[in-house]
Image (cartoon, rainbow, N blue to C red):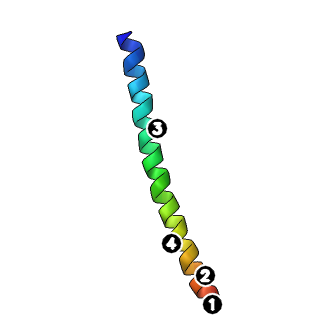
Amino acid sequence: MSKRYSGKSQKDRSFMKKAKLSLKEKRKLKEREKINNVRKI
């Protein structure tokens, strides 16, 4: 049980890290879109 639980916790941690990175990437994409829109106008 302990081994299974530790493995699950590690996966959850990596997933949380990936989620945080994706959020930052989304923010960057939004900022780029705003810059591109301003340049077009």
Percent x, y of residue 21? 45, 51
Q: Secondary structure at mark 4?
A: helix
Could you tell me how far apart the alpha carbons at marks 3 and 4 are, in whole angstroms? Answer: 24 Å
The answer to the question of whether label 2 and label 1 lie on touching residues, with beta carbons closer than 8 A, is yes
- Which amino acid type is shown beneath numbered disc 4? Glu
Mark 4 surroundings: few (<14), some (14-19) or many (≥20) residues within 10 A: few
- Which amino acid type is shown beneath numbered disc 1? Ile
Mark 3 surroundings: few (<14), some (14-19) or many (≥20) residues within 10 A: few
Q: Earlier in the sequence, mark 3 or mark 1?
A: 3
Q: Earlier in the sequence, mark 3 or mark 2?
A: 3
Percent x, y of residue 16? 42, 40
Give the side of residue 10 with respect to residue 25, left or right.
left
Residue that numbered label 3 is attached to? 15
Farthest residue, direction top = 1
Question: In what quadrant of the picture does the N terminus appear?
Answer: top left
Query: Image quarter for residue 36?
Result: bottom right
- Which amino acid type is shown beneath numbered disc 3? Phe
In this rendering, the answer to whether 36 lies above or below 23 is below
Q: Earlier in the sequence, mark 4 or mark 2?
A: 4
Could you tell me how far apart the alpha carbons at marks 2 and 1 are, in whole angstroms? Answer: 6 Å
Residue that numbered label 1 is attached to? 41
Percent x, y of residue 30? 53, 68
Mark 1 surroundings: few (<14), some (14-19) or many (≥20) residues within 10 A: few
The answer to the question of whether label 3 and label 4 lie on touching residues, with beta carbons closer than 8 A, is no
Could you tell me how far apart the alpha carbons at marks 3 and 2 are, in whole angstroms? Answer: 33 Å
Could you tell me how far apart the alpha carbons at marks 4 and 2 are, in whole angstroms? Answer: 10 Å
Rendered image: mark on residue 37: 2
Residue that numbered label 4 is attached to? 31
Mark 2 surroundings: few (<14), some (14-19) or many (≥20) residues within 10 A: few
The answer to the question of whether label 3 and label 1 lie on touching residues, with beta carbons closer than 8 A, is no
Q: Secondary structure at mark 3?
A: helix
